[in-house]
Each structure stands twice: as C-alpha cells, then as structure tokens.
Image (cartoon, rainbow, N blue to C red):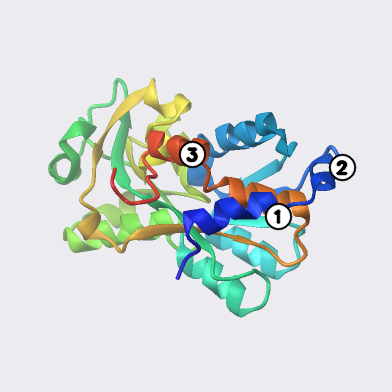
Amino acid sequence: MSLTRRSLAGLVALVPAGAWAQAPAGPLVAAASDLTGSLPRIAEGFRRAGGGPVRLTFGSSGALTRQIEAGAPFEVFLSAEAALVQRLVSAGRAEGPGYTYGRGRLVLYARRGSQVRPAGGVGELRAALADGRIHRLAIANPEHAPYGRAARETLVKLGLWSQASSRLVLGDSAAQAARFALTGGADAGLLPLSLALGPELAGAGGFGRIDPDLHAPLVQSAAVLRGAGPQARAFFAYLASAHARKVLRDFGLAPDGDA
C-alpha cells in the first residue's frame, strides 16, 4: 500500500530546521525521463518554498535502477514503473512502501510537417504503417524503459508488431525517443503524454492518445533511497504537495489517474 498524501505531507514537519541549510549542491534525485518537463518545475517550487536546490538526473527507469543497485549516490528515485521501486525496496536499497505520484499515458506524436496525422491515434497509426507514411517509428527501448514496453505491448495487441518492428527507432529513454520524433529521426513516435505536453514538443507537433487498455498500466512510483539525508526526505514529501500534484496534472500525470 502506498503512503497517503496526508502522511507524506506530514513528513515535512518532521524535518529538522537545520536540514534546509544543507550543502548548496543539494541531494541527487534520479528520475524517469518522462519527467523532464514536470520535475524541474516541482524542484523550483520546492526551492522557492525554502527547501533548497536539488540535482536532477534523468534516464530510463530500468537503467537508473541498475545504477542504484550498483551504488550510485542517489537519494530519491522517481520511477515510471512501480515494480522497479519495489525491487529496490526488496533489496534493501529503498524505503518502502513507496509513493504513487502519477499514472502515465501513451500517445502517438508527430512533428508539424509530418505526413502523419497523430490526432487520429490508433486508427492513424494503423493506416500510416499500412500506407508507408511511417517509415520510422520512435519508441523507448522496451528492454529497460517502461514506456517502450508499453509501446511494444500496444503494437502487439493491435496486431501491428510484425509490420512495425523493422521500422522501430529505439531511444535509450523515452526522452531520446521523443527527440527522434521531434528532429526527424522518425516520422512519428509512441511517447509519454507528459513529454508531448512539455514545452519542447507541444509547440512543435501534435498527438493523439492511445487507449490505456492496450498495455499494462504505467503506475509511476517514488521512494527514498538508503542513506538519504533530511533535505532529500523533505523533497520526497514535497511530491505530495498541492503544487507538485498540480504540475503533474498539467503534464498528464494525474496521481489519481483521472486525466
């Protein structure tokens, strides 16, 4: 069972006053790459609230999990897959039970000028693969990125995997897959809604939502890691604040799964 918002918010009150005056560098936070638009805004809100700076490192959730297991000095982990957080909890590298901060959504994205009309969603994906308008389709690598796995599951469930597999352009993370779709390295991409709503992609193209029933739920979870200091714990608690939750909703990552 995840921590409640009330209990998480209450952690802020337990942080000693001196914790806000830690070293200027701040704690190191590992985060799934679908948070590259939202998490900096949350971190800035935390800083303005008196929490001090935090350092953000983005990557695929699987790759970050392996780094943590190898001893990387992260203090908080925000994963795009709850199971990875539970894996760290079971190994004694993270404190349980973790906090579900959001639920991800997959979209079909294409930049302006592409022949692909992404607002058509699944229907357009099927048609554009069939008529050749999608020569290259960007997804995150399914071997270590939850959104890549969701993209693969979607293509399999639609009966499009054999048609699409030879056209895939794999990004090391969802953010890299998004860059392929944005810069012309791919004609379209199956990407996180949170990135499609971000400042880099939103003004450069459009998207259509993919039915979430076509893949396993993208339940996104965070945890405090072993050895975390008071400032890192305060930032973790801040994820349950009204400001953080609003930012997550604005980027299509409603914690309650209602967006």
Give, as a three-letter code, the residue at label 2: Ala
The answer to whether residue 252 of the structure is visible from this angle is yes
Which x, y percent locates residue 215? Answer: 27, 61
Residue at image coords 23%, 63%:
156
Tell which of 2 and 144 is nearer to you. 2
Tell which of 53 and 141 is nearer to you. 53
The answer to whether residue 180 of the structure is visible from this angle is no
Kindly report the distance in space between the C-alpha atoms of the residues bearing marks 2 and 1: 19 Å
Residue at image coords 66%, 46%:
57
Q: Is 43 on the left or on the right of 85, as rendered? A: right
Which quadrant of the view contains residue 43?
Answer: top right
Residue at the spot of label 1: 14
- For the N terminus, the quadrant is bottom left
Q: Nearer the viewer, mark 2 or mark 1?
A: 1
**Is disc 2 surrounded by few (<14), some (14 to 19) or many (20+) residues within 10 Å?**
few
In terms of secondary structure, where does tag 3 sit? helix
Residue at image coords 48%, 44%:
34
Q: Nearer the viewer, mark 3 or mark 2?
A: 3
Identify the disc placed on residue 242.
3
Identify the disc placed on residue 23.
2
Give, as a three-letter code, the residue at label 1: Leu
Identify the disc placed on residue 189.
none
Of marks 2 and 1, which one's residue comes earlier in the chain?
Answer: 1
Of marks 3 and 1, which one's residue comes earlier in the chain?
Answer: 1
Kindly report the distance in space between the C-alpha atoms of the residues bearing marks 3 and 1: 18 Å
Which x, y percent locates residue 209? Answer: 24, 41
- For the C terminus, the quadrant is top left
Tell which of 181 and 76 is nearer to you. 76
